Amino acid sequence: MAKPAKFLRNVPRLSTLFPLVLYVLFILCILVLAFSSRSHSDGKGQKTEQAGSGVSSNESPNGPAPLVYRKLEESVVKELTEAFAKADTNGDKHLTVQELAKFINFKIREHIDEAIRTNPIMFVEIDHKPRDGLVSWDEYQGYWLRGQGIQGDSHMKKSAFDKLDRKVKESIARDKAHWMEAARTDPLSLTLDEFLSFRHPESSTVNLLNLVDDILRQFDVDGDDHLTVEEFSDVQTTDLGEGKKFILSQNVRERREEFTKVIDKNRDGKADRGELLSYVDPRHPRYAIQEASTLFTLADANKDKKLLMHEMLAKSAIFISSKMVHTAESFHDEF
């Protein structure tokens, strides 16, 4: 009976030790699982970040700013990289303000030439019910809706119209407003020139001539249909009305210099309509120079007058919306 008694005396000790051992094992398991999960998550996150950026963590083209790339969409990086490479004509991996201005001017000219070239093609394509040399709002609206994958026209039922996406409705309303501005002869239809003014107001000679008229009306004090340097440099006369899209210098000295070097091409001391038409034309180099200077001011972080790729990426939003990259969208936001 001695051995059973001794065993029974040890039972309470084992019953106390067993729960303690289980508790220690449970804590160890939790720590092991937590550590393993964290390590796996960190590794996966790093791979996803690098894959999403399209640039590895070791890459830093033209500057030590890889984190900038990771925060941008791959399509944005691609667009900016391609534009930078085309503008960098000497291949020295940086842009001067002159290089940037030259490239912007090229993009502007390319856009306007393309708009003028394709305008009659689209006009003829839309003008078919009836083919009368005019594009009606009904014809254009049906054409535009079909381009959006929507069956309908300007006479669609209200119930069908109400089901359209909000952005589609806003586009229709915006187009209608622009249509009414372009329709000079008949509010229900546009001629070929009016159709160009409707789709690409920046490309329309008629619009530019109206702008010249606005300048003369505001600055031509003696009414001789010419501007002198004194008339043009009157800084008090600056209100040309809402939506007038040309840029004037802000002080007398700058305006006098601009008149002499930019506007008065034949150096006769006066600017006629032809010279003013060239001055307000978006293809004039002054527009590209002014935009390039603005972009440099905003993006040239170290002020060394050299624009590097990583500096441009750091200000990606302003470059994407500029005429350097999205020329058409930039124009259409202005006009």
Image (cartoon, rainbow, N blue to C red):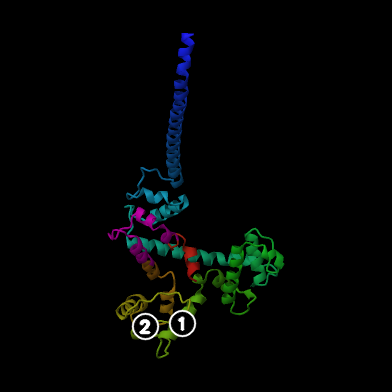
Q: Position of residue 234 (x, y in %)?
A: 35, 84
* Residue nearest the observer in this picture, 241 or 8: 8
**Which is nearer the N-term, disc 2 or disc 1?**
1
| 145 vs 214: above or below | above
> Which element type, helix, strand or loop, lies under badge 2?
helix
Which residue matches tag 2?
232
State the CA–CA distance, disc 2 to disc 1: 13 Å
Q: Residue furthest left?
A: 304
Q: Amino acid at mark 1?
A: Asp
Kindly tell me whether residue 156 is visible in this rendering.
Answer: no
Q: Amino acid at mark 2?
A: Phe
| 200 vs 251: above or below | above
Q: Taking 272 as reference, is 154 left or right?
A: right
Q: Taking 264 as reference, is 244 left or right?
A: right
Task: Please check the rendered image and state whether residue 66 is part of the magenta-colored stretch, yes or no.
Answer: no
Residue range in magenta is: 291-320
Kindly tell me whether residue 8 is visible in this rendering.
Answer: yes
Q: Main secondary structure of the magenta part?
A: helix
Q: Quadrant of residue 184?
A: bottom right
* Residue nearest the observer in this picture, 233 or 26: 26
Q: Which residue appears at 63% of the width and 77% of the height?
A: 187
